């Protein structure tokens, strides 16, 4: 640990406690949040004696600046048996603050919280957002659940589709920043996942383009039917073409819904896999750190070592399952692409037939040209989006296979 990585605990109360980038610390609680164990760094940074920490509520280190929304999301997630990651501002016994990125996971009988020192560019943004949200909570007396909705909406404005997307990107960014501070080699898995993450978001964006284009053109079959009715007997052929288009459009409505859902499944699987791979790495490094750390907690050490070893093993397995889930979801999305391409081809044939037939009716040429131009724009939008989606699909497929191969070799 370099001298600049630490600040003496005797610093003034308005100073921030800074611990080493190489220091990982943890605490374990029961299901009610009562502290059952922790390592030496946890106790030292919190500045409480062990007799003041053990069997006490974990909120003893909660800082008053923290928005309640964060803890509402945390408890809502872990009570469902799922892991979560969050930036947290804590308060030491003497009133000084310290920031951590915490990974909280369910364990037998309670929860395990593993913390590292955050330093990515996201930290400055989070500090601003937390301060604003905490002020809003106080000013409007927001309930935690309502404040959580505000937080999620704000994350959406910042470009994160949901909290899972935020915590995966945040943990990846923190590990990259930590590696840079410690002069560690670049983590290839994180690099690959970062690319996968961006590619999956681009894929979802393209899927949304198709859905929006479909919604904008959903009225075309009806407009053609109106046109056919205006032409009477002469519009019979246009009426038949309109009926065919309506059938294809109804199929497309179903497929567009499934298509965008499949794209979201891919995005969600990538986020989940990203977070699990990063969490597994942190837990593995925590175990190694704890093995070398001087014993501080007065409780027996060996049971905790076994628990940490079991936990990191479980998360390595979950990370591998997460990669397999990505492969499964991308395969499902590729099938949805095949269906979308088939329907797009059918719509194009119908458009051409409509163009030929409408050219015979000069009395309604202006209206038919408008409808046909709308259809042509729709077709081009779908074709361009599908072409880009095919490229993105291949990137995700290749990246996932590479990560799976590396995981099997590890």
Image: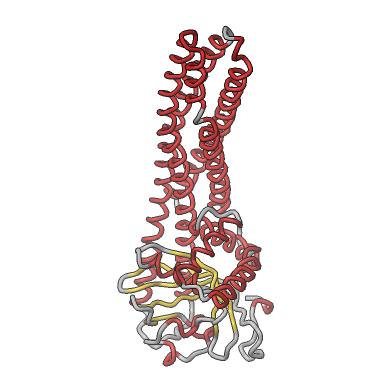
Q: Can residue 22 be seen at all in this image of the molecule?
A: no
Residue at image location 35% in from the left, 67% down from the top:
79
Residue 198 image offset from top left, x and y in percent = 58, 47
> Horizontally, is 234 left or right of 173 in the view?
left
Residue 135, position in %: x, y?
59, 75
> Given the current orientation, which residue lies at the most extreme right position?
4
On the picture, is 3 further left or further right than 401? right
Q: What x and y, as percent, mark residue 110?
A: 34, 73
Residue placed most toward the observer, 119 or 213: 213
Q: Is residue 44 visible?
A: yes
User: Residue 112 at what x, y percent from top left?
Assistant: 40, 72
Check the image and report above or below for 406 versus 357.
below
Specify the quadrant of the image occupied by residue 297: bottom left
Q: Residue at x 46, y 50 (%)?
A: 268
Task: Identify whether 183 is placed above or below 230.
Answer: below
Q: Quadrant of the rendered structure where residue 359 is? A: top right
């Amino acid at each position: 640990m370099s001298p600049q990585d630490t600040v003496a605990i005797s610093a003034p109360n308005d100073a921030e406690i800074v611990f080493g980038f190489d220091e990982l610390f943890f605490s374990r609680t029961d299901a009610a949040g009562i502290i059952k164990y922790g390592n030496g760094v946890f106790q030292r940074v919190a500045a409480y004696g062990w007799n003041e920490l053990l069997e006490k509520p974990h909120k003893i280190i909660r800082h008053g600046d923290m928005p309640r929304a964060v803890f509402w999301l945390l408890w809502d997630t872990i009570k469902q048996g799922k892991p979560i990651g969050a930036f947290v501002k804590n308060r030491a016994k003497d009133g000084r603050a310290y920031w951590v990125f915490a990974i909280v996971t369910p364990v037998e009988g309670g929860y395990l919280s593993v913390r590292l020192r955050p330093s990515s560019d996201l930290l400055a943004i989070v500090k601003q957002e937390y301060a604003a949200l905490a002020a809003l909570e106080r000013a409007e007396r927001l309930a935690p659940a309502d404040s959580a909705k505000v937080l999620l909406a704000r994350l959406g404005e910042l470009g994160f589709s949901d909290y899972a997307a935020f915590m995966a990107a945040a943990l990846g960014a923190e590990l990259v920043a930590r590696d840079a501070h410690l002069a560690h080699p670049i983590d290839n898995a994180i690099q690959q996942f970062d690319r996968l993450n961006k590619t999956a978001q681009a894929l979802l964006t393209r899927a949304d383009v198709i859905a929006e284009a479909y919604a904008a053109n959903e009225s075309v079959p009806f407009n053609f039917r109106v046109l056919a009715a205006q032409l009477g007997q002469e519009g019979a052929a246009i009426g038949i073409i309109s009926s065919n288009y309506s059938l294809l459009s109804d199929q497309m409505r179903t497929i567009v819904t499934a298509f965008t859902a499949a794209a979201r499944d891919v995005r969600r699987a990538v986020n989940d896999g990203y977070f699990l791979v990063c969490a597994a790495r942190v837990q593995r490094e925590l175990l190694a750190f704890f093995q070398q750390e001087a014993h501080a907690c007065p409780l027996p050490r060996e049971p905790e070592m076994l628990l940490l070893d079991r936990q990191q093993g479980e998360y390595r397995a979950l990370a591998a399952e997460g990669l397999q889930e990505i492969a499964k979801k991308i395969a499902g999305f590729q099938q949805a692409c095949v269906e979308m391409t088939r329907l797009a081809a059918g719509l194009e044939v119908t458009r051409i037939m409509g163009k030929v037939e409408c050219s015979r009716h000069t009395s309604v040429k202006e209206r038919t040209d408008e409808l046909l131009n709308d259809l042509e724009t729709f077709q081009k939008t779908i074709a361009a989006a599908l072409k880009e989606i095919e490229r993105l699909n291949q990137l995700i497929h290749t990246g996932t296979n590479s990560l799976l191969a590396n995981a099997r070799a590890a």
